[in-house]
Structures are given as structure tokens and as C-alpha cells.
Image (spheres, rainbow, N blue to C red):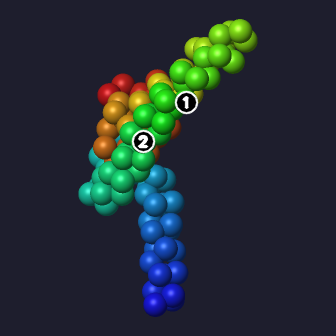
Amino acid sequence: MKKALVLMMMAVFLLTSTAGFAREPGDEPSGNEILLDLPIRVLGVGATLMGTVIFFPALIFTIPTGSVGLSARKLIVEPFKFSFVRPLGDSRTNYDSVDY
């Protein structure tokens, strides 16, 4: 049982680590890439919600330092773009320079 779990974990790590590097930028994602992207995108939605909840109490510290925009971008905007802006199965991380 333990060996099967370790082998399954290794297979998942190998598949997810090579999936992002296997395509050229203009190619369509495969079905496996889309299938693996779905649970990751759900985590991104959770990160967006958690970042929004953390952002408002953090205003006490960010307003005096002038870093409200930075904290909003890192806690809310980037997880939102990760979850809702990039195409399903796309593994790129720079969403601002890509035309969707």
C-alpha cells in the first residue's frame, strides 16, 4: 500500500513537472494538462478568497507605508488572474504580456 502511494505520488510529480515545459507557446494544451489544471485552479480561487480576507485587516499596516497597491496586487489580483484570466491548461506565469 505504501509503495503504491509513493509510486502514484512520483507519477503525479513527474507528469505535472514536465507538462508545463512540453509545449511551445502557440500550441494548444493537451487534455492531461487541462485535467491537471482544474484542481490547481480551484486552489487559486481559494487563494483569491483568502487573500481578499487578509487584505482588509492588512490595510492598517499598508496605508501608512503606502503599499496598498502592492498588497492588493499580490493578495487579490495575481491569484484572480491565475484562476480566471489565463486559459485552462496554460502553465505560463506572466499573464500581463500574453494576449488571450
Amino acid, disc 2: Gly
Rendered residue at 52%/81% (across/down):
6
Residue 54: which disc?
A: 1
Rendered residue at 62%/23% (across/down):
58
Q: Quadrant of the C terminus?
A: top left
Residue 44 position within the rendered picture, expressed as x and y whole percent measured from the top left: 43, 42
State the residue in front, 72 or 24: 72
The crowding category of the residue bearing disc 2, from other C-alpha atoms within 10 Å (few below 14, some 14 to 19, many at least 20), is some
Residue 12 position within the rendered picture, expressed as x and y whole percent measured from the top left: 45, 69
Above or below, 97 against 62 in this view is: below
Q: Secondary structure at mark 1?
A: helix
Residue 99 position within the rendered picture, expressed as x and y whole percent measured from the top left: 36, 25
Amino acid, disc 1: Ile
Rendered residue at 30%/57% (across/down):
35
In the visual, does 41 lie left or right of 64? left
Provide the residue designation for mark 2: 46
